[in-house]
Image (cartoon, rainbow, N blue to C red):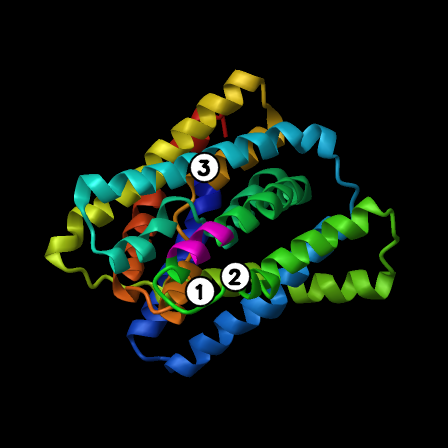
Amino acid sequence: MAETVTVLLPIIALIALGHLLRRTGTFGPDLWGGIERLVYYLLFPALLFGTLASRPIDLAAGGLMILVGLGFMLGGMLLGIAARPLLTPSPQAFASIFQCGFRFNTYIGLAILGGIHGPDGIAAFALLAGFVIPLANVASVWALARHSRHAILPELARNPFILATFGGLGWSALGLPLPDIARSTLLFLGEPALPLGLLATGAALSFALDGRQQALVAYFVAAKLLAVPALALGMALAIGLTGVHLAAAIVLAALPPASSAYILAIRMGGDGPLVAATVAAATIAAGITLPLWLYALGH
């Protein structure tokens, strides 16, 4: 537990610092928007590609982890669909908050796995994320596209996380060497991705919440932080997943939704404030639930 808290405290501190800097007006909104775009389109894809392309990918060892990941992602989607008859949200609200049941904050996950397992942890998490990010994006964009004029395929084709992840996997699968200059450049670009991503996550948090929507937010926070990781742990133990692959699966399942869910909702005409409130509540609650899940794994 002490090791887990040691890893999580700097993450929570950076998120809190980003929120404080944004709310005090120390830096203008244009800066935070620029940081989000820089991390989203350049720094984080460089980290993903460099991590995956520079090491052999053992799909045989990671196959069970990927199977568990796909399973709990589908479970999160089913829990989201179940909210419709239970809480009867408006079509726009449901389309927007639906993604909060299964999307995850990749920055926090990489920071945790890197802190616990080092480069092997980052590689395992990136491999799993590479297979579930397309599923998460397809489901999220599909739900919102039904209430807008945005097309699903173009949205997926230009997603930088998907392009970088599968580019790195393909490079590694082909056995291509990564030149030293390229490796160093990707390393320099990837190093600031996590701290800047965590600062941007904190800056994007919003606590505005309509009282009528509290039950909807509470449901999705509980589903994402409790039900989905419980499902992941049950599946992982049932099929004998262990080590870094077990940790990667449980951490990814237990992560709060990413602030990019808010960006997607806004861009596609959804209920942005509802998503922002859900992300804020889940991120705070994850400071309690994540250490408990990692403690259950013995970290």
Q: Which residue position is annotated with label 2?
A: 195
Mark 3 and mark 2 residues within 8 Å of each other at the beta carbon: no
Q: Quadrant of residue 145?
A: bottom left
Residue type highlighted by circle 1? Leu
According to the picture, the residue beneath numbered tag 1 turns out to be 199
Magenta-drawn segment: 138-143
Choose top left, top right, bottom left or bottom right for residue 150: bottom left
Residue pointed to by mark 3: 74
> Alpha carbon of mark 2 to alpha carbon of mark 1: how far?
6 Å
Give how far apart the Cα atoms at labels 3 and 1 are. 30 Å
Residue type (three-letter) at the residue carrying disc 3: Leu
Check residue 141 for magenta coloring: yes
Asked whether 26 or 211 is in front, the reply is 211
Res 63 seen here:
yes
Secondary element at tag 3? helix
Residue drawn at 26 percent across, 65 percent down: 273
Q: Are marks 3 and 1 in contact (CB under 8 Å)?
A: no
> In the rendered image of this protein, does residue 290 appear above or below residue 9?
above
Left of 2 or right of it: where is 158?
Answer: right
Q: Which mark is residue 48?
A: none
Query: Would residue 202 be found to the left or right of residue 63 on screen?
Result: left
Residue shown at the point (40%, 70%) measured from the top left? 267
Q: Is residue 17 above or below residue 71?
A: below
Three-letter code, disc 2: Pro
- Front of the two marks 3 and 2: 3
Q: Nearer the viewer, residue 108 or 69?
A: 69
247 falls in the magenta region: no
Question: Label 2 crowding class (10 Å Cα cut-off): few <14, some 14-19, many 20+?
Answer: some
Dominant secondary structure of the magenta stretch?
helix
Say which element carries label 2: helix
Q: Are marks 2 and 1 in contact (CB under 8 Å)?
A: yes
| Mark before the other along the chain sequence, 3 or 2 | 3
